[in-house]
């Protein structure tokens, strides 16, 4: 709750006005885009059309579609597709594990760009996105090793789950992450619309092939190596996972990966403290341990709804009155914080129509608690299992309401 409040205050602490676009350098760089695919019959043709809409010189684009060796479905789909010359399919050989980061590491061997970006199968990037990325890298020094764009959903009207997912993503990418950047905290990366200097990826060893949230791990490793991540005001539309059980499966993978990432980097807490410094080390504790404990212990928090319903809480007779009132107040404040941040994020994303749905997030987050239990239990017997998210159930043109965020100030960026 404290992190959300601080991030929201930081994100909105200064008036945000128009920001002058960073001009493109005279000499454009080759940009490699790695796109891992797995069993993507429904999405493949849409992906090719969306990537073809990118406004960047074709000779300088290097799109690599990464296919697993045993994925006959996607192989057959692409076999009849008319790939442009700047787009090629690479087959990842079989191995003991089958994860997205393993495919990315293999694909990196074939990338010819000095900038390497990641897209997912269902992505619809803004046409000018690569130009913005190239311009920002050219304007920054080598300490800026990574640029993270904004993710939004083009099917947010599909159903209630899609609306809530859109609100959650808006809060994360439009409020929390910009606020964390303003606060000088380590930025956990998203799995897509994230771009790197190729030389830095080679230096730090690429992705952890065994981690199912390779993005969060890589963001933390970049910080430990002394590099910075900046946010870029460019939006990629994605397909919201709007079916309950697939949503739980996807979220359980994310939370399992958060737990693994936290465990890996906390094997030597003193070294992590030296690498990050006290402030960012504190931020990592709040972000990773706080996220996991938030969902795992949520039922204890929800028990305070009993009071609002006029029922007696089990702790009422066990705690001193002041302690019980303090806990109750924290509960109300946490629920109000989630509500206010979601409403502000919806407006910043240009989707004010979603604001009334923020109150229904009370019924949405219990799904994440179920996912947390599934993910934490799965660590015991399938820690490296990649629970595949199926795409193509809501393939629509990006909504008219999908737009860039309110521009970030240079300091936020």
Image: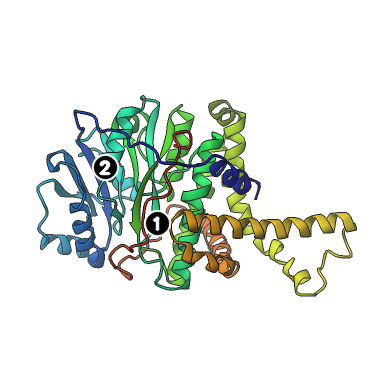
18 to the left or right of 113: right
**Residue identifier under label 1:** 152
Q: Quadrant of residue 9?
A: top right
Q: Is residue 60 above or below residue 373?
A: above
Q: Position of residue 103 (x, y in %)?
A: 29, 48
Front residue of 222 and 158: 158
Front residue of 94 and 337: 337
Q: Quadrant of residue 263?
A: top right
Q: Secondary structure at mark 1?
A: strand
Front residue of 28 and 296: 28
Q: Position of residue 30 (x, y in %)?
A: 20, 35
Which residue appears at 80% of the width and 75% of the height?
Answer: 311
**Is any part of residue 103 visible from this angle?**
yes
**Is any part of residue 382 visible from this angle?**
no
Q: Which image quarter is the C terminus in?
A: top left
Q: Is residue 103 above or below residue 277?
A: below
19 to the left or right of 80: right
| Spatial CA span between label 2 and label 1 | 17 Å
Instruction: Bin the neighbour count of mark 1 within 10 Å (Cα to Cα): few under 14, some 14-19, many 20 and up.
Output: many
79 to the left or right of 34: left
Q: How many marks?
A: 2
Q: Position of residue 113 (x, y in %)?
A: 22, 35
Which residue appears at 32% of the width and 65% of the height?
Answer: 391
Front residue of 129 and 330: 129
Q: Position of residue 197 (x, y in %)?
A: 31, 32
Q: Quadrant of residue 308?
A: bottom right
**Residue identifier under label 2:** 130
The dot on residue 277 is none
């Amino acid at each position: 709750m404290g992190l959300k409040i601080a991030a929201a205050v930081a994100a909105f602490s200064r008036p945000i006005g128009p920001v002058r676009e960073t001009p493109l350098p005279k000499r454009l760089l080759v940009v490699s885009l790695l796109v891992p695919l797995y069993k993507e019959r429904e999405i493949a043709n849409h992906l090719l059309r969306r990537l073809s809409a990118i406004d960047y010189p074709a000779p300088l684009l290097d799109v690599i579609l990464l296919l697993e060796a045993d994925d006959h479905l996607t192989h057959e789909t692409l076999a009849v597709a008319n790939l442009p010359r700047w787009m090629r399919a690479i087959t990842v050989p079989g191995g003991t594990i089958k994860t997205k980061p393993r495919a990315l590491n293999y694909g990196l061997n074939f990338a010819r760009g000095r900038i390497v970006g990641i897209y997912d199968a269902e992505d619809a990037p803004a046409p000018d996105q690569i130009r913005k990325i190239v311009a920002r890298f050219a304007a920054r020094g080598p300490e800026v090793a990574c640029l993270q764009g904004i993710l939004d959903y083009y099917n947010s009207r599909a159903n209630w789950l899609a609306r809530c997912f859109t609100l959650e993503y808006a809060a994360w990418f439009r409020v929390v992450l910009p606020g964390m950047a303003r606060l000088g905290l380590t930025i956990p990366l998203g799995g897509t619309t994230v771009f790197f200097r190729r030389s830095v990826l080679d230096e730090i060893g690429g992705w952890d092939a065994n981690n199912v949230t390779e993005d969060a791990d890589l963001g933390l490793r970049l910080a430990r190596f002394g590099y910075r991540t900046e946010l870029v005001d460019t939006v990629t539309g994605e397909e919201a996972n709007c079916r309950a059980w697939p949503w739980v499966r996807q979220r359980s993978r994310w939370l399992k990966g958060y737990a693994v990432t936290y465990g890996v980097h906390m094997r030597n807490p003193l070294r992590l403290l030296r690498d990050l410094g006290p402030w960012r080390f504190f931020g990592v504790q709040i972000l990773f341990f706080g996220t996991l404990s938030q969902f795992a212990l949520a039922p204890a928090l929800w028990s305070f709804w009993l009071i609002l319903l006029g029922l007696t809480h089990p702790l009422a007779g066990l705690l001193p009155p002041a302690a019980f009132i303090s806990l109750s107040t924290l509960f109300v404040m946490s629920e109000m914080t989630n509500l206010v941040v979601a409403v502000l994020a919806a407006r910043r994303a240009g989707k004010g129509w979603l604001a009334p749905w923020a109150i229904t997030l009370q019924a949405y987050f219990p799904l994440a608690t179920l996912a947390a239990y599934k993910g934490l239990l799965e660590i015991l017997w399938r820690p490296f299992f990649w629970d595949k998210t199926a795409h193509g159930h809501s393939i629509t043109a990006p909504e008219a309401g999908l737009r860039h965020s309110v521009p970030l100030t240079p300091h936020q960026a």
